[in-house]
Amino acid sequence: MQAGFTQIPPQPSGGKKVVLGILIFLIVLLILSGIGFGVWYFFIKEDEDEDEDEIEDEMPSGGNTTTEEPSGEEPEEPEEPDYLGNFTLFPGHALKGNNIKCSKDSTPETCAQNCLETENCKSFDFNTSSNNCCLSSKTRKTAQSAYTEYPDGAWNFYELKGVEQPVTDFLGKFLHFPGHALKGNNMKCIQNLTPNTCAQNCIETDGCKSFDFNNSSNSCCLSTKTSRTAQSAYTKYPNGEWNFYELPMTSTNIQERILGQACNDVYKCVNGKCENGVCVDYEDPEPTGGTNFECTKNSDCGRGLSCSSSRQCKKESGVTCVRPSECASGQCVNRKCK
């Protein structure tokens, strides 16, 4: 190098400058592209991913978005509840009265549904002609005589299954004297009962010892009297409509009966025979009275008898007799006590 001159580095040729500029441009372009991709990924792509997640959540399990082709079969209808199956049918019968409510334009099924949905409903009547439906809290047994037969067949009775409870045999506690009753001497009379419910009423009524029951009218008459204490009021009814029921006594001598009084396997006749539920003389078919029964007052004796000074029941004047000893006067003339 010569003194006094500064060495200048060699300058690139024009072609090289062009190549270098292109390289710098490409580098800058790549950098800007990377920045742009980052912006797109973090802002736009993230929103798209969220949308896809929402779509996947809405898709059925498995992600299958295809719709199944119909098979051509009709969808099955849900089965209707069998309301009527909860009831027992008694055709040609219904309860007379005793209704909770009645409705029109019904069917047996809707009537059964109404009963099941109504508090305390145990049965219903349905009229096949008018489509009337009447709900009731009664059953055949509790309705008693209101349970009625309708031969024309228009009415049908439906009773809820399992509502009937075993019925207590109140009647079994009484002695039965068919064809007899007490004339008068009633505590009270009740209509439309059964012999068993009449017996229940007597047991549940203070002082009741007997009752009369009429088979035709279903009348029940309670009494404090017995066939013994009622004396002549204990009457025979040959038509058989009336029946007399009496609670048995425990005292042995109370169970001994004299002529004209009620008798059966428990109440024995002491001086006669038991015929058709009444003590009669062995030789006298009519229950006109008895003798030689120990007494303290006239009421201890039967019909047509009085208590004599010897404390024995004797027949009064005019009463049919067989032997003089039966009469209070000691005289039996033409089968009549003098």
Image (cartoon, helix red, strand yellow):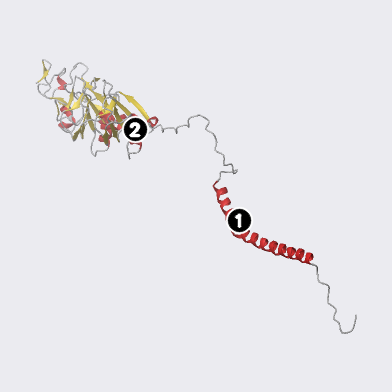
Q: Is residue 162 left or right of residue 49?
A: left
Q: Residue furthest bottom?
A: 4
Within 10 Å of disc 1 (Cα), the crowding (few <14, some 14-19, many 20+) is: few
Q: How many marks?
A: 2
User: 263 or 105, which is in the foreground?
Assistant: 105
Q: Residue 225: give its label.
A: none
Task: Estimate the x, y position of residue 295 in percent, counting from the top left.
Answer: 19, 31
Task: Determine the CA span between mark 2 and mark 1.
Answer: 62 Å
Disc 2 and disc 1 in contact, CB within 8 angstroms? no
Q: Is residue 247 visible?
A: no
User: Which amino acid type is marked by label 1?
Assistant: Lys
Task: Estimate the x, y position of residue 157 in percent, counting from the top left.
Answer: 31, 28
Q: Is residue 87 visible?
A: yes
Name the residue located 75 percent from the left edge and 64 percent from the top edge. Answer: 18
Instruction: Place residue 125 in its image quadrant.
Output: top left
Q: Residue furthest right?
A: 1
Q: Is residue 24 left or right of residue 288?
A: right
Q: Please, what secondary structure does the residue beneath circle 2 have? A: helix
Q: Residue 110: give its label.
A: 2
State the quadrant of the C terminus.
Answer: top left
Which residue matches tag 1?
Answer: 45
Earlier-in-chain disc, 2 versus 1 = 1
Instruction: Place residue 99 in its image quadrant.
Output: top left
Q: Please, what secondary structure does the residue beneath circle 1 have? A: helix
State the quadrant of the N terminus.
Answer: bottom right
User: Which amino acid type is marked by label 2?
Assistant: Thr
